[in-house]
Amino acid sequence: MTNILELQNLSKHYHSNDHQLTVLNNISFGIEEGETCSIVGPSGSGKTTLLGLCAGLDSASTGKVWLNRMCLNDMSEDERAAVRGEHVGFIFQNFQLLPTLTALENVMVPMELRKEQNIRSRAMELLERVGLEDRFSHYPTQLSGGEQQRIALARAFSNTPRILFADEPTGNLDEATGEKVENLLFELNKEQGTTLVLVTHDLELAKKTQRIIRIKGGELVSDEKSVNVNY
């Protein structure tokens, strides 16, 4: 199998006056196409920073990142944004829906940016797939947290991403709602053959992925296959 994501000796430092804070130190791993992987670790361990570097949302201090066999280090911010628009989907803990747009319009946005055809029907299909066929015209403030995250799921898969990055996707949801969102996430991921990289503090959620990478204090401390994969 080919690695869709590869990190080589990745570090991230922040400088303040004469002090250097190391958030990530010398991280290396690869993720194969179609693999599901969790990144876990205590609060402040560098999980979200690592996810941002993997997706090209930020630049590493040292080391290299290859996404879909393209080296992000060699790209401008505009070039990295183009790669994300073409190949990457995102799901965030706080949903990040546009409040002035309806559910349908929120799902259509990535497709509009890509100048795709038949985007309205595609967006409707995705919302129906996540059980929101009666919420097309609702605005985010009119919806529950679980419904908003299901819209975010539909939006994330609207560009048929090669890789999906999810940052604590159920962190703001109650247990029952979170489980429903988890099931939809893994079902859609499997249907589309997407690679999933999931940041979570929830070990039960992490165990649903094929592989668990643990970081602590900015360093990779273990990388192992999950023994309880459900998907």
Image (tube, rainbow, N blue to C red):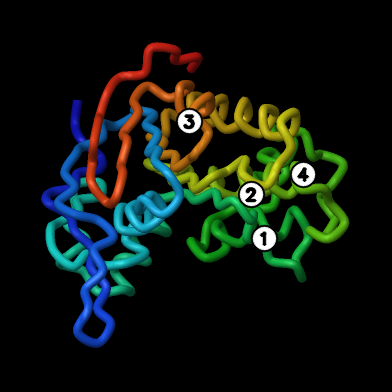
Q: For this view, does 117 lie left or right of residue 59?
A: right
Q: Secondary structure at mark 1?
A: loop
Mark nearest the camera among 2 and 3 is 2
Q: Are marks 1 and 2 in contact (CB under 8 Å)?
A: yes
Please identify the residue farthest to the front as the structure is shown.
19
List the residue tagged with mark 3. 192
Question: Dot 4: within a 10 Å radius of its alpha carbon, few (fewer than 14), some, or many (20 or more) residues?
Answer: many
List the residue tagged with mark 1. 97
Dot 1 or dot 2: first in sequence order is 1
Residues at marks 4 and 1, CA–CA distance in whole angstroms: 11 Å
Name the residue nearer the viewer: 228 or 7: 228
Q: Is residue 163 above or below residue 9?
A: above
Dot 2 or dot 3: first in sequence order is 2
Name the residue nearer the viewer: 115 or 25: 25
Mark nearest the camera among 3 and 4 is 4
Residues at marks 1 and 2, CA–CA distance in whole angstroms: 7 Å
Dot 4 or dot 1: first in sequence order is 1
- Amino acid type shown at disc 2: Ala
Q: Secondary structure at mark 3?
A: helix
Name the residue nearer the viewer: 30 or 199: 199
- Quadrant of image for the N terminus: top left
List the residue tagged with mark 2. 152
